[in-house]
Amino acid sequence: MLKFEHVSKMYKGGKRAVDDLTLEIEKGEFICFIGPSGCGKTTTMKMINRLIEPTEGSIYINDVNIMDRDPVQLRREIGYVIQQIGLFPHMTIQENISLVLKLLKVPEEKRRVRAKELLTLVDLTPDYLEKYPHELSGGQQQRIGVLRALAADQPLILMDEPFGALDPITRDSLQEEFKKLQKKLEKTIVFVTHDMDEALKLADRIVIMRDGKIVQCDTPDEILRNPANEFVEEFIGKDRLVQARPNIQTVEQIMNPSPITITGDRTLSEAIQLMKQHRVDSLLVVDDRKVLQGFIDVEIIDQKRKKASLVRDIVEAELFTVEKQTLVRDTVRKILKIGMKYVPVVDDKHRLAGIVTRASLVDIVYDSIWGVDDMTKIG
Amino acid sequence: MDTILQFFSTYGSEMLFKTLEHLYISVIAAVLGILIAVPAGVALTRFPKGAGIVMGVLGVIQTFPSFAVLAFFIPLLGVGKTPAIIALFFYSVLPILRNTYTGVSGVQKSLLEAGRGMGMTGWERIRDVEVPLAIPVIMAGIRLSTVYLIGWATLASFIGGGGLGDYIFSGLNLYQPEFIIAGAVPVTLLALLTDLLIGKVEGWVTPKGMKKMREAA
């Protein structure tokens, strides 16, 4: 659907920001451009909606050369999300979401309906429509930023480090949400980032660039398994190559399937005894159908033991979980980056299936360093 | 007290007339200033290199003594209200122009990029993004300029433009303090009231989202 043919961009002084780039992107594909700063990834992306015009070569969208299109018209057909979010502070959320529709002269009534409908995609209630951007958190603002790019049902969306300015936890949940959204809506997405984790997590194909040229363009798994050269290897980072062990793919395969749990109707002293018995400092709280409710730990018990007697009164529901099918490399990152001691693993009905702890990670690293023989046998 | 009442009974209706005349001169000059300076200020933001020069030249003109400017217009346009209004208009331009320029260039670049990337034309960006966001700064310029104009409009009397300046000049020439007061007090009141009124207008035209944002900050 999107095709680059020998595209180059030269700036004054003869610097080639993009150098003879040829690439084809399929419909519905999620492509990440990644590389060190100044590698030409953003320039490449901005040439697609003609914010920057190529010096040489041509770009085709659905076999139409974009240079034959009116740039304004072209941009209205392409979604655009930027790192700085760029919501207009003087417009309500509704006006922000439906701005492109307004430019396209869609009547007010339809714009309202569309904005409301889009808001449900990101689990925001309709009362947000009348709010102003400053009343929203950074994460919510960028959700609106993404919706704005979806408003006119654009088949192609450009994203310039959209989650780069968010804190790690918000970024993580937005990435997950967005990946789901993309699968559901079947958009073609061109995504620029400098965060390898983000690219590995989101992309169908990753385009690694350096000095305006493509170094490697492949699926995340293929890049992890067969980095094209030393630059790619270094760019990915050694620790991620460890995670790329092909025989361990999903969390289910590495998790501890029997974490220590407790139900809400037990007393706190029972909880303490259970912790002592198993030598752990926290317990996962489940109901009788094994649906995860939250967790308790020694600190919480210590703080609240005077006021409460049952586990359900003090259970902490804020808890990061991963699904069984999640790839190991994403979980590893959560544990390492957010600094969590463990991550509960749940199935699609939020029932507790197991737990991944730092100890499980040690096992992976151990295997990958000393278990080479085993690996070759399996592979 | 008696003197004041006597003064009012003799000159009351004339004073009212001169006040209206005064207001007329300054408001027309201010409106002309807004009509010219706001679009010109926006236009200047498209040529940042030229903007410095234009701003500098206008800054120099602003320093000319107002008497000199008024006198300068007599051979060109004669005497009366028109040359007075035109001269005052020149003075109103710079503050409005400068504020419009500053306000519009102060709009975050990321917002402009978002607008451009979403397919807004240059005109749509000006109308829907840049001007609404610059409104508070533009209005501050208009307010300042209009209040100054009301003060300066007393000079209109010097070239036969009328207004409350007539009283002040008569008072000065004839050494009659009551005339000076009869001119100066209404001018001051007028200026204060206008400031208050434009302050209100500023509140009405500032986009709601920005007001809320400032309250929150």
Image: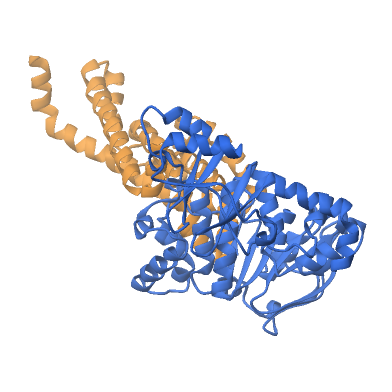
Chain colours: A blue, B orange
- In the rendered image, residue A39, in percent from the top left (x then y), is placed at 81, 57
- In the rendered image, residue A131, in percent from the top left (x then y), is placed at 38, 52
- Tell me: residue A44, above or below residue B99: below
- Depth check, front residue: A132 or A318: A318
Side of A288 where B190 appears, left or right: left
Q: Residue at x 24, y 16 (%)?
A: B177
- Depth check, front residue: B114 or A1: A1
- Tell me: residue B157, above or below residue A72: above
Quarter holding residue A116: bottom left
Q: Residue at x 54, y 66 (%)?
A: A149
- In the rendered image, residue A195, in percent from the top left (x then y), is placed at 72, 53
Quarter holding residue A315: top left
- Depth check, front residue: A156 or B151: A156
Q: Residue at x 77, y 53 (%)?
A: A364
Q: Quadrant of the C terminus of chain A?
A: bottom right
Q: Residue at x 68, y 77 (%)?
A: A66
Q: Quadrant of the N terminus of chain A?
A: bottom right
Quarter holding residue B164: top left
- Tell me: residue A28, above or below residue B120: below
Q: Residue furthest bottom?
A: A63
- In the rendered image, residue B64, in percent from the top left (x then y), is placed at 52, 32
Side of A24 where B92 appears, left or right: left
